[in-house]
Image (cartoon, grey):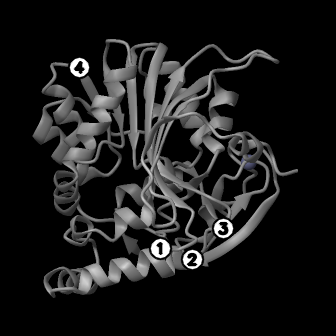
Amino acid sequence: MTGESIFRALPCDCCGSSRWEYKFSEGGFDLGRCAECGLHYIAQMPTQEGRMMEMEHRRFGANRRVIDAGLQRDEETRYRGRFQHYVELARRFAPPGKWLDVGCGTGTLIGLVEELDIDIEGIELTPDRREAARRLTGATIYDRPIEALDLAEESFAVVTLTNVFSHLVSPARTFSHIRRLLRMGGVLLLATSEIGPGVARHHDYSWYLGDHLYFLGDHTIERYADNLGFQLVYREKKWAPDLLYRRQRFLTKGGSALRNVIKGACVYTPGVLPLLRLYMLKVRNRKNPHYVSTLLLKKVPVRQPGQIREPARVKDGPVAGRIIETAGRAPKPDDAVRSKPNS
Ligand SMILES: [Zn+2]
């Protein structure tokens, strides 16, 4: 633990409910799920100041370290295609105008947007990543949270938050600030996890609790959107284990030297990775409801009581080991049922 003084307990960030149901613990942090909206969050929520201090020093929890800018850059480069996909998706839905990448890492997405001659700025709180992003892109990279910056209202067409949601101290507060900065019709692109109620600790080898503070439930984002004046216009879901047990993932180095050696051995010993993948997908993760989602939210006027919105286009990824790719699927009737609060 980083010290009791920076922790405080909170009601649900999305719906305000205090009905928090315990799921599992890791590294001294307890993860639970809001019984109303499905948002998963840790009980030991840090304050904004405590979290800022951790980011400055690239650490969290009981002295665990976040990877340095060099490893971060390697990972971003390996997943360059995914960033390209985010940029193409946001362009498809957004009006013309300036972009902002919140938690821009070493600036891979910024570089791709600059190649299109679109103005873009970034925010990065970890010093070595921020310096790398400035050096590699030449863009303005801010060193403070979005809430503390004096940016002009309605001055951005697109705001991107890729792999950032889980690290926010209050996503609702951050979303509200983003909405103020977006022009009407502007787009917030979110790349993050969505997990169902049956998630268990063994469904991932590390959940990085303490660094990860929140995970969306399977329909929490609709609640956030409705509360804050956004409309979900696009969702793409990929089953997390399918992404995790791929060669590309095993070639990405993390902060643990031992784990890097084991991952290398799996990739370079013939037959090991396919067998491991088969076991992990068909047996160990058979009921794992963890998805990695790309979500596009459009800024709309705050919804009036009784007003009904068009459903989002949904592209589902693999479900329980079977790969199902359905573009433009309309929500099934049970989606609507499941999105209601389980009161
Ligand atoms: Zn809730």
Secondary element at image label 2: helix
Q: Identify the image quadrant of the N terminus.
A: bottom right
- N-terminal of the two: label 4 or label 1? 4
Q: Where does label 4 land, which residue?
A: 119
Asked if residue 217 lies left or right of residue 49, the reply is right
Determine which quarter of the picture holds residue 107. Answer: top left
Query: Can residue 59 be seen here?
Result: no
Decide which of tag 3 and tag 4 comes sooner along the chain.
4
What residue type is disc 4 on? Asp
- Which secondary structure, mark 3? loop
Q: Identify which residue is drawn at 68% across, 45% down.
A: 13
Q: Is residue 231 left or right of residue 139?
A: right
> Marks 3 and 2: which is nearer the front?
3
Residue topped by disc 2? 201
The amino acid type of the residue labelled 3 equals Gly
Give the mark nearest the N terminus, 4 or 2: 4
Q: Say which element carries label 4.
A: loop
In the rendered image of this protein, does residue 268 appear above or below residue 290?
A: below
Nearest-to-viewer mark from 4 and 1: 1
Where is residue 46? Give x, y as percent.
58, 58
Q: Nearer the viewer, residue 264 or 160?
A: 264
What separation in Å lies between label 4 and label 1 (alpha carbons)?
A: 38 Å
Quadrant location of residue 97?
top left
Q: Residue at x 88, y 50 (%)?
A: 343
- Label 3 belongs to which residue? 198
Is disc 3 in contact with disc 4, using a CB cutoff of under 8 Å? no
Question: Which amino acid, mark 2?
Answer: Arg
Vertical position of residue 239 compared to residue 37: above or below: below
Residue behind mark 1 = 204
Marks 3/4: CA distance? 42 Å
Left or right side of 25 for 34 = right
